[in-house]
Structures are given as C-alpha cells and as structure tokens.
Amino acid sequence: MNANRRAAAERDRKTYREVTAQLGLLAGAKGLYDMVKLQSANWRKQVDALTAQAEEVRALSVEPAAAAAAPRTGAGVSQ
C-alpha cells in the first residue's frame, strides 16, 4: 500500500510540474495565435501519450486473450 501511495504522490508531482510549465508558457504568449499554438502542441503531446498507453494495454491483453482461447488439456478436462 505504501508503494501505491508513493507512486500516486510522484504522479501528482509530475502532473503539477507539467501543468505549471504549460501555464507558464501560456502566460508568456504574446497573443491568441501563440496561445492556440502552445495549446495545440500540448494536445498533440497528450494524444501521443494516450495512443502509447492504449498500445501498451493492447499488447498486454494479447497474451491473456490467447491463453484463454487455447484449448484446455490435462486432468479433469473431458473431451
């Protein structure tokens, strides 16, 4: 449980750093164009991260799905 709390705290610190960095960039924007450009770059980064996470989940789910689909053999299995 302690490891989960540490991991959650580290994730929260990372999120805080990223958000404050983004806000700092937006605050330094000279106009609407710069703000939209910065926000678009941030959205692109978020979509890339989401895509990578989805691919990781897909890769992790392939092996258990293949094992579940495999024919069962051995003691106690009637055929």
Image (tube, helix red, strand yellow):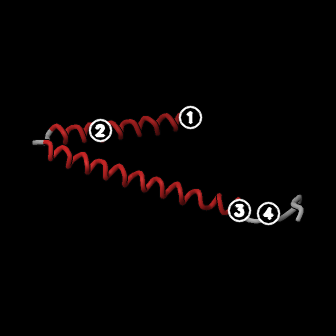
Q: Evaluate if marks 4 and 3 touch, with contact meaning CB atoms under 8 Å apart.
A: no
Q: Residues within 10 Å of mark 3 (few under 14, many from 20)?
A: few
**Is 8 above or below relative to 58?**
above
The residue beneath circle 1 is: 1
* Amino acid at pointer 3: Ala
Dividing the image into 4 quarters, which one contains the C terminus?
Answer: bottom right
- Residue at left 11%, top 42%? 31
* Amino acid at pointer 2: Val
Measured as percent of width and height from the top left, residue 32 is found at 14, 42
Q: Residues within 10 Å of mark 1 (few under 14, many from 20)?
A: few
The residue beneath circle 3 is: 69
Report whether 30 appears left or right of 7: left
The residue beneath circle 2 is: 19
- Tell which residue pokes out farthest to the left in this image: 30
Alpha-carbon span between mark 1 and mark 2: 27 Å
Residue 72 is labelled as: 4
